[in-house]
Amino acid sequence: MAKKTPIPELKHLDHVLVSETAIKRRIGVLADQINRTYRGKDLTVIAIVNGALIFTADLLRQLRTPLRLDCIRASSYHTGTQATGKPVIVDNLKLDISGHHVLLVDDILDTGNTLSAVRELIIAKGAASVRTCVLLDKKARRLVPFEAEHVGFEIPNEFVVGYGLDFNERYRNLPCIGVLKSKYYAPKL
Ligand code: IMP
Ligand code: MG
């Protein structure tokens, strides 16, 4: 069998926290939960991009319920790896969600600021119900109370990249979740 070409950025990782195989397997379990929850119901999935892009793409292909997909963008001001203050929600939803069941999907639940703001917006638009699915949950970092109904992995308080998550917009294309080597955090002089 031909050898797989190595993905260059993997060498930037100090260690892999969640492997590609583990992600794939866990998404199967999450999809089973979600399929059970929404069986016979019409679902609208709202992905918070860019971070949730890859997770959503893989999750949706395992969902067996009829669904619609829309995206919303949220941005926080960042200093290095720390988000500061309230996120700005760019509300460019194309679908009418009034009276619809909404599943919000994001890459990571960190301080909880983003998901609680987006959730409030969805409720204000009259959704019939809102549930949340995140790939990663960094419970230790919570600043506002928020629990996701569907969680892929609880992770320790480390800054992670890959599978949609970025550091300065890089590393989103890694197939796994990993912790960057500290030298890649160092500011360039
Ligand atoms: P919040 O702090 O829960 O509002 O999360 C805001 C956003 O910060 C998430 O949607 C991610 O895009 C980003 N974020 C939080 N923790 C990490 C991390 O460890 N790596 C990469 N991005 C992160
Ligand atoms: Mg994000």
Image: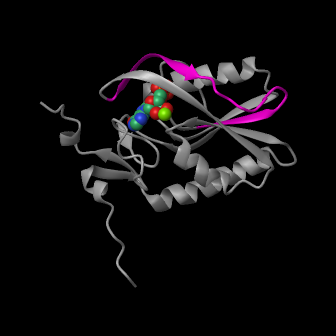
Quadrant assignment for the N terminus: bottom left
Q: Residue at x 60, y 29 (%)?
A: 147
Q: Residue furthest right?
A: 40
Q: Is residue 76 left or right of residue 31?
A: left
Q: Residue at x 75, y 43 (%)?
A: 68
Percent x, y of residue 127: 79, 26
Q: Residue at x 84, y 42 (%)?
A: 42
**Model colouring:** one colour
Percent x, y of residue 129: 78, 29
Q: Which residues are magenta?
A: 81-105
Q: Is residue 35 visible?
A: yes
Residue 77 vertical position relative to residue 53 in the rendered view, above or below = above
Q: Quadrant of residue 140?
A: top left
Q: Is residue 187 left or right of residue 95?
A: left
Q: Is residue 100 left or right of residue 153?
A: right
Residue 184 vertical position relative to residue 117 in the rendered view, above or below = below
Residue 153 vertical position relative to residue 86 in the rendered view, above or below = below
